Image (spheres, helix red, strand yellow):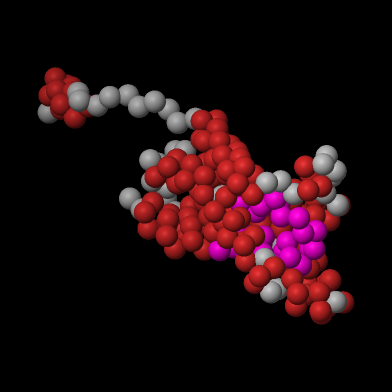
Amino acid sequence: MTDASIDELIEGLTGDLQPLKPRRIARGSLWVAAGWLAGAAALLWVAGMRHDLAAGIMMPPLPMLAFWTIVALGVAAAWSALRMGLPGVGRDYSGWYWAGLAALALPLTALVIGFGDHRAAMEAARPENGLRCMIEGAMSGLGVGLALFAWLKRAAPTSPARAGWAIGIAAGAAGATIIALHCASNDMMHIALWHGLAVALSGIAGRVLLAPLLRW
């Protein structure tokens, strides 16, 4: 095959191709931030902010620690999901695993407290005292989940299962932080159980429902 033939073959294969706009993680981050803020605005507009925050009073230390721990988990999971949408070989997407392990301190703390006060633990576990928080938390994170799904759907990640987990955990953590701005409970057992369930169930939903939709 002559050089001219090779050139003609290459021209035939690439002649109709158009350059693609490079994907920038900053753009995806803006989508996630917009979804997070939209979920918070919607819930607080409908249900209102917890009374102490509305009065300019800070959360007690333990609920505040729980809040920032879940924020860290949501940011880490969202960042990992965004990076899964970029081209590259051998990237490490495990950063959010460590944030997840750190977040396990919340249910462990609640468990220790529950051992010392069985009646309070039973009261916190009653659905009428927390089921609404779990549902509202999961719903509030949908904006983040949709933003990450749209970002990864266009990228076709190499591991849809891992991507589904990351999307779900990020969405659930975002929702749990949003519901913490409305829920007036400072009980660590309530926060660990019902707010934590919003994260866990969202993660499972991401793995089961979204992962098949992200396959090539």
Residue 101, image x, y percentages: 69, 60
Residue 179, image x, y percentages: 66, 52
Q: Is residue 141 visible?
A: yes
- Quadrant location of the N terminus in the rendered image: top left
Asked whether 152 falls inside the magenta stretch, the response is no
Q: Is residue 77 visible?
A: no
Q: Which is more toward the observer, 72 or 119?
A: 119
Quarter of the view holding residue 105: bottom right
Magenta segment, prevailing SS (helix, strand or loop): helix
Residue occupying the point 86% across, 52% down:
61
Q: Which is more toward the observer, 16 or 130?
A: 130
Above-or-below relation of 3 to 108: above
Tell whether 35 sits left or right of 47: left
Residue 72, image x, y percentages: 69, 47
Residue occupying the point 58% across, 43% down:
42
Q: Which is more toward the observer, 159 or 132?
A: 132
Asked whether 190 falls inside the magenta stretch, the response is yes
Chain part drawn in magenta:
173-201
Tell whether 93 sits left or right of 11: right
Residue 203, image x, y percentages: 54, 59
Residue occupying the point 61% across, 51% down:
175
* Count of numbered labels shown in the rendering: 0
Above-or-below relation of 19 to 166: above
Residue occupying the point 52% across, 63% down:
204
